[in-house]
Image (cartoon, grey):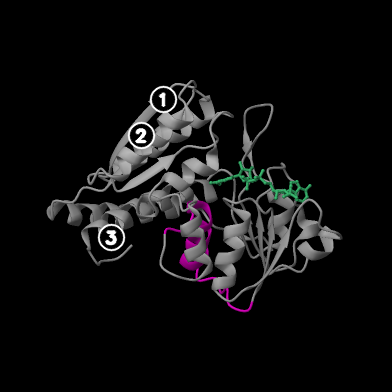
Amino acid sequence: MSAEIINGRELADELRERMKEDVEQLSEQGIVPNLTVIIVGEDPASLSYVRGKKRASHKIGIHSDLIELPETTSHQELLHLIQQLNSNDEVHGILVQLPLPAHINEDEVIETISPDKDVDGFHPISIGRMMAQKDTFLPCTPLGILTMLDEKNIDIEGKHAVVLGRSRIVGKPIGQMLLNRNATVTYCHSRTKDLADVLRQADILIVAIGKPAFITGEHVKKGAVVIDVGINRLEDGTLTGDVDFESASEQAAYITPVPKGVGPMTITMLLQNTIKAAKLKNQVTTRS
Ligand code: NDP
């Protein structure tokens, strides 16, 4: 038996169509959601990500400004710019592309963004609200994963979710968000003992480590849901995930591919968070 593929590209396109209508309704009320993205330096991968975010925003009617700053930008200059954007009423969401150059303190930058405009969901206040199960901006990749599970009507409650990887942007928050939905959650990382045994217990296996084909069919319980967050570029230029798709899909009931899996959902959730920020600012209560 081969797993059902959860196509993140198709799902993202469907969701973006729905969001486009939402944005149209907002603009009829004179509200144009505005996402401002800041990038410091000229890392080609980061530049391509931020340009992708801007394109995706425009396609659904969100206004997006991309501020490209030189590598030499000082820590203080960046903080000052964020403070200006915080007090600019036209800006609903602020995103600072990470990583930042080494001379800039990333934590302080994130903490300077107003929690009301924290569409990436990385601010400690957003994280605290998530843990306390209050309404907040949830980080985009984990939110994209939850949305995929929900759109496929995959039960979370009572399931054993194993999360491989404990980064602040993916592993830790997706574990917390699954816990909030009543899963039993186990976190695994580089110091986990008997890793293969733990992985084989997962009803829902989330893999986010950045190691090509690290997970194979041997690690996957029959009928499990496998979510591959990894994005790895091989020497020949192709993109691949952390999961060996062929062998894992022989075991799994559902699996996400790479590409066309979690990646397109991440940007979609950024758009969703930006619409949410615009609605909060204007006290509009409709969906998203
Ligand atoms: P990080 O590099 O920040 O963290 C990697 C995690 O994996 C760490 O917790 C580390 O453990 C763990 N790990 C690494 N090697 C092993 C191992 N051999 N055994 C067990 N655990 C291991 O990862 P990110 O979360 O930032 O990214 C993970 C992957 O997801 C990357 O490929 C990244 O490109 C991709 N990604 C994809 C996104 C998308 O939209 N699809 C968004 C964000 C990331 P320890 O903590 O002990 O060091």
Which three-letter amino acid code belongs to the residue tagged 3? Leu
- Specify the label residue 280 is tagged with: 3
Q: Which structural element holds mark 3?
A: helix
Marks 1/2: CA–CA distance: 11 Å
Q: Is 73 drawn above or below residue 30 in the view shown?
A: above
Q: Is 219 drawn above or below residue 74 in the view shown?
A: below
Question: Among all residues in the image, which is located at the extreme right?
Answer: 194
- The spot of residue 139 in percent (x, y) is 49, 54
Question: Among all residues in the image, which is located at the extreme bottom?
Answer: 158
- Specify the label residue 69 is tagged with: 1
Q: Residues within 10 Å of mark 1 (few under 14, many from 20)?
A: some
- Specify the label residue 26 is tagged with: none
Q: Which residue is mark 2?
A: 81
Nearer to the camera, 231 or 139: 139
Write the residue at 47% across / 26% down.
74
Write the residue at 31% across / 40% down.
85
For the C terminus, the quadrant is: bottom left
Which three-letter amino acid code belongs to the residue tagged 1? Leu
Q: Is residue 266 left or right of residue 236?
A: left
| Mark 2 in CB contact with mark 3 (< 8 angstroms) | no
Judge whether residue 215 can be spotted in this image.
yes
Mark 1 vs mark 2: give the one in front: 2
